[in-house]
Image (cartoon, helix red, strand yellow):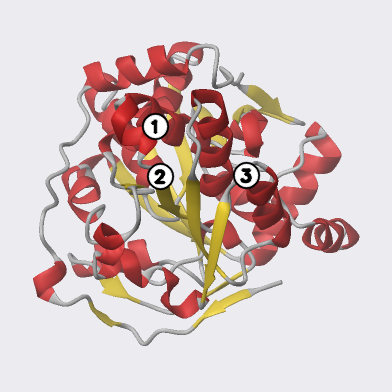
Amino acid sequence: MTHRVPRPASRIPTSLIVDPVVPRPSLADVYAARDRLRGVAVRTPLLPLHEHPSIRLKPELLQPMGSFKVRGVYNALAAMSDAQRARGVTILSSGNAAQALAWSARRLGVVRVRAIMPANAPRTKVDAFRALGGEVELRDPEHVWDMLLDRSYVNVPGIFIHPTANPHVVAGYGAIALESLEDLPDVATIYVPVGGGGLLAGIANVVATLAPRVRVVGVQPSGCAPIIAGVAAGEPVATTCETFCDGVAGTFMDPDTWPLLRDLAGQIDWVTVDDDATRAAIRRLAMGNKVVAEGAGALALAAALEAEHRGQVVAILSGGSIDPEMLTKALREI
């Protein structure tokens, strides 16, 4: 299935471009997140890409529920007080963050969790969230993310975990950078798939502090690159989106995440890859490394394979919750 979300290219209303009261996580916050995640998240290894040992894979798809999201969502949930968690928790998600929330809630004893999801979210992700006791509200894909744009998320029941700008979420993702730098001290480039930008912000934040010599590359599908468009414009903009990579499908740069990415602009380069290259990366992972990635999960590898680079490279494999039909289609194109 290709996700098509039409939206005319335009500026985000200036009234919404307001720095949120969300501090950029400190290095101490990241280390605290890693402590909370010890015994919860997998310390994923760096695996050499089959027949290409200069590219190392960081398989975050080995995390509980199949994606990196558990690092951020669990950390945010664990950082709450008992009274806050008792109010219930809501998140916006195309699937992976919702699954991470439901899994984390069970571990921490949170009774009520809710996810607002686009109606075209992969059925496997919706069903997995429900199976863990989550309550799902499916909305029109063209409008579901508008809750971030107009900040109407402040009206949701219980506590809202912002999927990309919550500082505890971003700090949890920063642990991925800590591990990568520790396991491969001479890494030259880290490729990161970009949807809302939280993972990229978490990784670039740590790299900028500990290893500013390392190049961080944000990767979006060529048919769905609202953050790259916003960076080029110097402000959040709205665009169109057409890609099979449902995990990163969106039409605008979230105003709350923009300040984080703006502050880290000097650490980040940007590239796009087309869907055919991403499907080829899925095939290569499955046939060579025996690893199954979803579209968003293979984006970073697709970009790394297209680039000419010197030195060691890390590609973040962000998730593996691929719809069986999509996987079958990718494998049949061998």
Which numbered disc, 1 or 2, marks the residue closer to the eye? 2
What residue is pinned by disc 1?
A: 77
Judge by depth and name the residue closer to the eye, 155 or 45: 155
| Viewport quadrant of the C terminus | bottom right
Judge by depth and name the residue closer to the eye, 190 or 106: 106
- Cα–Cα gap, marks 1 and 3: 16 Å
Amino acid under disc 3: Gly
Which numbered disc, 1 or 3, marks the residue closer to the eye? 3
- Give the secondary structure at mark 1: helix
Residue 254 image point, x, y percent: 29, 61
**Residue at 33% across / 83% down in the picture?**
9
**Residue at 55% across / 12% down in the picture?**
39
What residue is pinned by disc 3?
A: 133
> From the viewer's perspective, is 207 left or right of 179?
left
Residue 315 image point, x, y percent: 55, 36
Amino acid under disc 1: Leu
- Give the secondary structure at mark 3: loop
Q: Is residue 13 above or below residue 106?
A: below
**Residue at 44% across / 36% down in the picture?**
73
Judge by depth and name the residue closer to the eye, 98 or 192: 98
> From the viewer's perspective, is 220 left or right of 171?
right
Contact, CB < 8 Å: mark 1 with mark 2? Answer: yes
Contact, CB < 8 Å: mark 3 with mark 2? Answer: no
Amino acid under disc 2: Val
Q: Earlier in the sequence, mark 1 or mark 2?
A: 1
What residue is pinned by disc 2?
A: 89
- Cα–Cα gap, marks 1 and 2: 8 Å
Residue 312 image point, x, y percent: 52, 26
Label 2 neighbourhood size at 10 Å, few (<14), some (14-19), many (20+)? many
Residue 237 image point, x, y percent: 27, 73
Q: Is residue 71 above or below residue 262?
A: above
- Give the secondary structure at mark 2: strand
